[in-house]
Amino acid sequence: MSEEISKGLKITWLIHTAVCIYYGFMYLFFWESLMGLSKWIYHDPVYPRYFGMTLIAVAIINMIALFKVKEWVKVKLYLQFVILLCGLYAIICIWALTLPITSEDITFTSINAATLLGFLAAFLYFYLQMRK
């Protein structure tokens, strides 16, 4: 097993952090604008802000894992959490595509699902590489 976190995983975490910060701030502060773009029919002003804060919290922990922790064994459990989170959110996005939603929502949800599946594949790849 490798002791240091691989450069590829660090780059993936950095990109994931940027995406989490972007979406986190969009859901936290600009929810109404985001919903105006997607024409989403459900309007709950609180839940999206919870989701936004969750993404910002993930971004903060990503930065800690990226810049403070150097050993693989110390980030392994967190990486497993991120893999699980990306996988579950991707399942929710794919399930949402089966709901009666507008074409704008299909586009928005498809982009989210593709992004999450991309991160899931990358994190799984690096996790399996680091386990060897």
Image (spheres, rainbow, N blue to C red):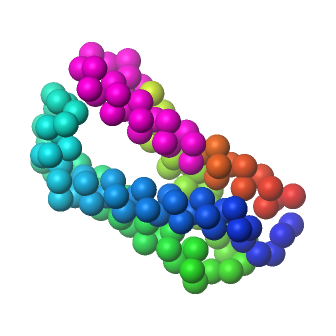
**In-image side of 82 versus 51 (left or right):** right
- Tell me if residue 97 is in the magenta stretch: yes
Q: Residue at x 26, y 26 (%)?
A: 104
Q: Residue at x 46, y 35 (%)?
A: 113
Residue 85, image x and y in percent? 50, 49
In this rendering, the answer to whether 114 lies above or below 98 is below
User: Residue 26: horizontal and vertical position, in percent?
Assistant: 25, 54
Q: In this view, does 69 lie above or below 44?
A: below
Residue 37 location in percent, x, y?
19, 37
Query: What is the quadrant of the C terminus in the image?
Result: bottom right
- Residue 107 at least partly seen: yes
Where's the N terminus, which quadrant? bottom right
The part of the chain drawn in magenta is: 95-119
Locate residue 30 relative to residue 22 in the image: left or right.
Answer: left
Q: In this view, does 12 lie above or below 43?
A: below
Q: Does the magenta stretch include residue 20?
A: no
Residue most toward the bottom? 68
**Residue nearer the viewer, 14 or 124:** 14
Identify which residue is drawn at 52% across, 60% down: 15
